[in-house]
Every structure is written in C-alpha cells, then in structure tokens.
Image (spheres, rainbow, N blue to C red):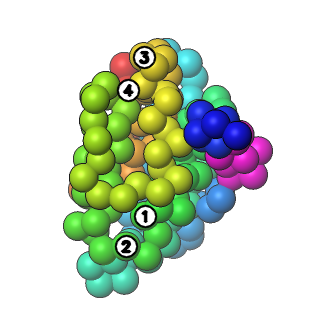
C-alpha cells in the first residue's frame, strides 16, 4: 500500500466515522465557521482545564475533507496545552498552503491532510475547522454571539 492510499484511507475513515462530533454544553468557548464557496458550515465548542484544551466537539455539515479535517483536529488537540494547540494550528496551516513545507513537529495522522494542497480549491475545506478553532480560542464563549469565521 502506498503512502497516498494510506492517507486517503485516513480521510475516508474520519469522514465516515467522525470523532468528537456534537456539541459541548456548557462550553468555555465557541466559534462558528462557514465556507460560502462550497457551503461547509461548522461550529466548534471547547472546554478548558487550566491552560489545556481538555475537550473539543464540532458540529455541522460539509464535504468529506471538511468533516475529516475537523475529526482529525479534534483528536489531535484534545488534552493538549494551549501553546501546543497553537503550534499545531500554525503547522497544519503551513502544511496546507506551503508546497515544500516540512513540519517542525510530529503531526501523526494530520499528515493525511498534506495531499489537499494539490487541490487549491479544497484547502479552504481542510482549513475551515482550524480557523474556527483558532477563533474559539481567542474569544470566550458568549452563547448569543459566537465568533464567526469565513474562508472566502
């Protein structure tokens, strides 16, 4: 099995059986993301324990890459210190947007997203959840006005 096939299988698995799908209620922070070009829309709710992101859930609808990326993200960031979550955010963004990027930290299953950069129109699908998480981490939850993110 080639590495490309393995990465494709990871994306398909996380799309078919998304991990951490749903909402946290109550949540310590929340943000909503939308990609008007393709209609992907999701919300991210998180809980903190000190300086750690203790739990994350995502909810919404989107294409296979959008859902798989959110599922992979949820597994990768849960339980991590906020500084590590920020580092993952930067690394995944570079992985998706810089053709020759070599990650400075181990990304594990997140490397499955590397193939997306070959399809520029899909980069926004894969990055939507990451931008939405970033918005949730920079603004506390206000049930009536969760920060909104758009990938236009």
Mark-to-mark CA distance, 2 and 4: 26 Å
- Image quadrant in which the N terminus is located: top right
**Residue in the image at 31% along x and 25% along y:** 99
Q: Is residue 138 above or below residue 126?
A: below
Mark-to-mark CA distance, 4 and 3: 13 Å
Residue 80 badge: 2
Q: Which residue is mark 4?
A: 151
Q: Which residue is mark 3?
A: 120
Secondary-structure class at tag 2: strand
Dot placed on the residue nearer the N-terminal end, 2 or 4? 2
Horizontal relation, residue 67 to residue 51: left or right: right
Regarding residue 151, the answer to whether it shows in the image is: yes
Q: Position of residue 118 (x, y in %)?
A: 45, 20
Q: Quadrant of residue 63?
A: top right
Residue 54 badge: none
Quick check: marks 2 and 1 in contact, CB under 8 Å? Answer: yes
Q: Which residue is mark 1?
A: 77
Mark-to-mark CA distance, 3 and 2: 30 Å
């Amino acid at each position: 099995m080639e590495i490309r096939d393995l990465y494709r299988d990871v994306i398909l698995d996380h799309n078919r059986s998304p991990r951490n799908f749903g909402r946290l209620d109550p949540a310590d922070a929340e943000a909503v993301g939308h990609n008007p070009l393709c209609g992907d829309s999701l919300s991210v709710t998180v809980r903190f324990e000190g300086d750690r992101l203790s739990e994350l859930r995502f909810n919404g609808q989107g294409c296979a890459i959008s859902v798989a990326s959110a599922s992979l993200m949820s597994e990768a960031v849960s339980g991590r210190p906020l500084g590590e979550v920020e580092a993952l955010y930067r690394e995944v963004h570079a992985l998706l947007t810089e053709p020759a990027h070599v990650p400075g930290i181990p990304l594990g299953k997140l490397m499955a997203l590397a193939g997306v950069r070959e399809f520029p129109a899909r980069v926004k699908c894969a990055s939507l959840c990451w931008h939405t998480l970033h918005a949730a981490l920079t603004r506390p939850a206000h049930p009536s006005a969760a920060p909104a993110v758009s990938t236009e």
